Every structure is written in structure tokens, then in C-alpha cells.
Amino acid sequence: MATPMPVALIDDDKDLRRATAQTLELAGFSVFAYEGAKAALADLSADFAGPIVTDIRMPEIDGLQLFAMLKGMDADLPVILMTGHGDIPMAVQAIQDGAYDFIAKPFAADRLVQSVRRASEKRRLILENRLLRKAAEDAQENSPLIGQTPVMENLRKILRHIADTDVDVLVAGETGSGKEVVAQILHQWSHRRKGNFVALNCGALPETVIESELFGHEAGAFTGAQKRRTGRIEHASGGTLFLDEIESMPVATQVKMLRVLEMREITPLGTNEVRPVDLRVVAAAKIDLGDPDLRGDFREDLYYRLNVVTISIPPLRERRDDIPLLFSHFAARAAERFRRDVPELSPEVRRHFAAHAWPGNVRELSHYAERVVLGVEGGAAAPVPAQPTGGTLPERLERYEAEIIRDALTANDGDVRSTIEALGIPRKTFYDKLQRHGINRGGYSARK
């Protein structure tokens, strides 16, 4: 059962305070009631998890003075002012100064409850965003491999365990999952960190160039080789060589690479000189090299030579609980780069986290965060209203049904046919439910 959201209530009128507290408690809130501003200020802090509801006319410290003090404590604390008719001009000014809402007395109970619900949802999102930003900062300080799910905790544990050994490592993972980040961590956490970290994408170079890039060449070794060139392997001596997309390495080069791994020596093109190298090799593959059907032309003996330790990076869709944390990290980095404010995690963005398959993994999430920071994504879907915590069983079922429909619309980009098929209901029933729940299909990137 969800923990009731807290609400601070300040009113010097004992009877009205008791009645208002009862109204909020019946609506599912946990009420902290105070007879005056001094008592409230002695108890409240910037970490208070809910909104503040206060009367304006009170002795010693009135509601407007209290609002100013609370704003100094935390500018994002939602303050709702209860006002008499004569106080409305003051309350309007307070709204302009940052108060969340004002409610004129006498007020209907539902008017107060709805305002507190909206303010509670806003406060929840603010505090959640703060926690995510702090967690992202802490995670970045401890490791660039961000994530709090058990699978990521275990991955970091394995990396720390093997980092300071000289064992070669094979990293398996989908495109954009962070294979190079793993290689860099192995380098930085090892005694080789003072040496070079040298990366080469085997799939980005033609067969005629890759051997020269890896092994180097002497002047005149081939047409166009006007001067001596140190290869990537030799340049990585004393450090770490990262070979990305090693499954794309030409077969002829695989044979020579196998000898490097076995003998730790190279012979550059155009010379018979054998040069020893001291390096650790971290290779990465997008496919399962252990599967003969997927391995294709990749040499089995090279696979087994690399497969001393294999590290598998899970795709983002299998660790969705890490997505908000990663997004906060990427959004903060993008905001600094583009000189923009760091955006809040809106309900629209959260629905995208849950509905999207993330085929591009962490790299795709990074680009999405940049687009949200720039304001070109993140606001297309219709906002979900704050969900009440109480109500009768039929009322709760109604809210649950509305949420299911919104989720289906989000998952299907607002397409009516796909959404109806996913929900398994007739078209007329679908439109009747949209009208009953006040759902605007046009806010979900709808297609005709």
C-alpha cells in the first residue's frame, strides 16, 4: 500500500483547522497540523515531502510572512494560501511571487483536495528529480558506468575484481550499450592507467588499411608509405588496446592478431624486426562469438584466445530502473553543453522511458536527453493528472482504466487502430471511454 503523502496545515482557528485536517485525511493525506507559523517553522525543513496549506491572517507571523520564510527555506515548496475575501488581492500578489495556489473562504472541500493533490504531485516530482540528479552525480564520481540495478552493481564488482590483472577480456553487448566505457574502466582501474588507451574500430577500416593501422609500417613498405608509422598495437604497449567490432576483422588480420596475443610481439610491415609489446587487449563484439552460426568467418582459435574473461553488458530494456538515473546524468551534461536549464523529469518523458524499446541502448538515451534539453522532445504526450490515493472501488477502477488507456496510446504513438487492438475493445467503446475520462488523443503524437 502506498505511503500517504504528507501535508502541513497551519491555521490558528482550532475548529477550522480540525475540520480541514479531517477533510484532507479522508482524501488519503497524512496531515501535520500546526496552530501557528512558529510551531510549523520549528518542525518543517527543506526536505518536507509535501505541500504547505496555510491561512493568511494569523497572529505574530501571518501567512504571507510564513510563505516568504518557506520560500527562503526551499523555493520549490508548494504553498497554498487560504484567504478571506478581503485578502484576495494579497493572495494574487503572492501567486505572482511564487505561491502555488490560493483558495478563498468559504471553500468547497473538493476545491482544497484537488489543489493539494496537484501540489503533492509537483512536490513528489521535484524531490524525485533532486534525488536522481544527486544519484547521477555520485554515480559519475564513483564510476562512469552508471546504474543502480543489481545487474549493474554486479558488473562493476566484476570489473573491479579483474581490472588490475593483465588478462585479456572479451566484452559482449548490443550497439550503444557501453562496451568502450567498460574498456576504459578496465584501463583506468588498472596499473596500466599511466599507459595509452588505444581504441580501434575494426568495422570502420577497409582490409587494405587495417593491418597498417594495427602493426605499423616502415618507410617504403608499400606505395604511399613515405615515412615510418607506429601501429596501434605498439602505441598501446604499456597500456590497453581496445578492438571494437572485432567480428569485422578480416581473416588474414585475425591470424596475425592471434600471434600477437600468444607471443606478445609484432613485426611491422616492411621489416623482419620483431618487437615485443606489453599490452592488455580488450575486444568487443555485437554478436555472440561463441555461437558458430553467428561467428561466421571469425576464427574459433582467436575467439577462445580472447575468451579468457567474457563480460556481457545488458541492454537498456533489461534494466529499465536505471533509465531515469542515466537520463538525469545525460540531461545535466547536455544542459551544461547547450547552456540550458536542466529539465524536470516530466510525466511525458517517464512514459517514453517505459514504452520505448531503446534499440540504441545508452547511446540512444543520451541523444534523447539532448533533445529534451533542447525542447524538441518530451512534451508531445498529454499530461497525466495527479492520481488520488483514496476513493471508492469504482472510482479507483475508473482511474486505473484511464491510466491503461493512456499507456496504450503512448505505446502506439496515438494510433487508433493499434491502440484498439492492444486494448481489445470496439472502436465506439474506445471513443466513449476517451470522452468519459477526458483523454485528448491528439496529445499522443496521433496518426490518422
Image: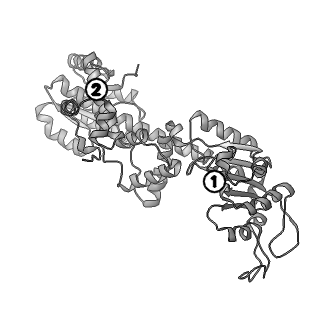
| Left or right of 119, for residue 310 | right
Query: Circle 1 — which element?
Result: helix
Query: Circle 2 — which element?
Result: helix
Pinpoint residue 250: horizontal percent, then vertical percent.
70, 62
Residue in view at x 42 percent, y 60 percent: 339
Q: Note whether 417 is above or below 219 in the view shown.
A: above
For marks 2 and 1, give the CA distance: 45 Å
Residue in view at x 22 percent, y 17 percent: 19
Nearest the camera: 400 or 290? 290
Mark seen at residue 6 = none
Mark seen at residue 399 = 2
For residue 388, which quarter of the picture? top left
Q: Note whether 53 is above or below 71 in the view shown.
A: above
Neighbourhood count class around disc 2 (C-alpha, 10 Å): few under 14, some 14–19, many 20 upward: some
Mark 2 or mark 1, which has the lower sequence index? 1
Q: Quadrant of the N terminus?
A: top left
For residue 292, which quarter of the picture? top right
Pinpoint residue 302: horizontal percent, then vertical percent.
77, 52
